[in-house]
Image (spheres, helix red, strand yellow):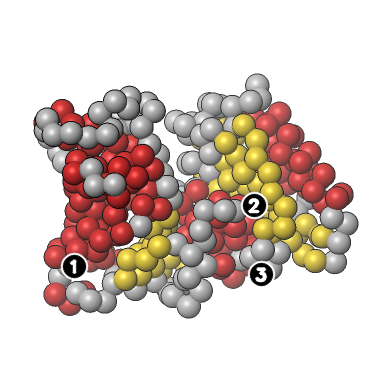
Amino acid sequence: MIKVTAGIDIGGTGTQFGLVDPDGQVLTEGKVDTRGTHSFEEFIDKIAAFLRQHLVENPGLELTGIGVGAPSGNYYTGTITDAPNLPWKGTLDVVQLLNDRFHVPVVLSNDANATAMGEKVFGAAKDIKDFVMITLGTGLGSGIVSSQQLVIGSQSMAAEFGHVMVRDKGGRLCNCGRRGCLETYVSATGIKRTLTSLLAKHPCASALRSVSFDDLTSKDIAHAARSGDVLAKKAFQKTGRVLGKNLANLVAIMNPEAIFLFGGLAQAGDLIFNPTRRALEENLLDMYKGKVQVLPSALGSQGAAILGAASLAHQQKDYLHYELS
């Protein structure tokens, strides 16, 4: 029998899940609509049914644990409480519901922490003791590994780097209710807002003028930038400068060896990495200059969310010390 862990990544619109072997191979995978059920328990039942089907169709696999990455996932309580991007309100008892159905250890953490652990267990951070994971999706998430341990915080709310305030007056409104949070400038949504502002200020031609804000994606902006669109290029330069400058502050606190970028915006490659690296070096204290790498995640996009979530269960004894009560 091959011992496998299940990874479940709960997103605002879609939820991915699958079975992962000890070498980090995603053996089975599936996806469901996060908003397609009436209750959270019904949602869990739907995922459980698919995972059971995967196990039945692969009789040589033995499920030994489940890892769940989710917005506002609380490692200590095993619950999600009032996540703004999920359709269910109140406290969602993720760990207990899954444990009742599979009777194996279940570990819950927020999605960025899961990605950080995925990089540590299966990706490019296997031999790195101190690093930061930055996830650049709809918002900006972060996970910090220090001395080989995931930094969780006293209330399982550490590393909310996306909500560091970078402008105290006149800043962009954030979904958290405050203004000026980093993720309103550095994320797939943030770069859309930056481009929209540039389009309003500059009359020069742009292929993106005819695209509505709702239809616009960071991928569209990257394509336009590579095609020579001046404002699209400028949007990436501004986004990278803001990210790099604020990463310099984070380096002064955490002293990481590497910073990994993951997510849709990170897939823009040099368009985002080059200005980020330049701004980081320009703003680092002299003692850190040349000593911090900014790297793309080695998890890639295919199956990365599942790998990240599964890694929570895969390494729970070594890294998270999580035990069911």
Taking the spot 37% from the left edge, 48% from the top edge, the residue there is: 265
The residue tagged 1 is 281
Horizontal and vertical percent position of residue 118: 54, 61
Q: Nearer the viewer, residue 318 or 44?
A: 44
Q: Nearer the viewer, mark 2 or mark 1?
A: 1
Horizontally, residue 284 falls left or right of residue 207, namely: left
Q: Secondary structure at mark 3?
A: loop
Q: Nearer the viewer, mark 3 or mark 2?
A: 3
Q: Which mark is residue 23?
A: 3
Callout 1 touching callout 3 (CB < 8 Å): no
Q: Residues within 10 Å of mark 1 (few under 14, many from 20)?
A: some
Q: Quadrant of residue 274?
A: bottom left
Q: Quadrant of residue 24?
A: bottom right
Q: Nearer the viewer, residue 193 or 104?
A: 193
Taking the spot 64% from the left edge, 52% from the top edge, the residue there is: 7
Along the polypeptide, which appears first: circle 2 or circle 1?
2
Horizontally, residue 53 falls left or right of residue 70, namely: right
Horizontal and vertical percent position of residue 314: 64, 63
Q: Which mark is residue 7?
A: 2
Taking the spot 25% from the left edge, 28% from the top edge, the residue there is: 209
Mark 3 to mark 2 CA distance (whole Å): 14 Å
Q: Amino acid at mark 1?
A: Glu
Q: Secondary structure at mark 2?
A: strand
Q: Secondary structure at mark 1?
A: helix
Q: Amino acid at mark 3?
A: Asp
Look at the picture and state if 14 lies above or below 95: above
Q: Amino acid at mark 2?
A: Gly
Horizontal and vertical percent position of residue 99: 73, 46
Along the polypeptide, which appears first: circle 3 or circle 2?
2
Taking the spot 22% from the left edge, 35% from the top edge, the residue there is: 206
Res 269 visible: yes
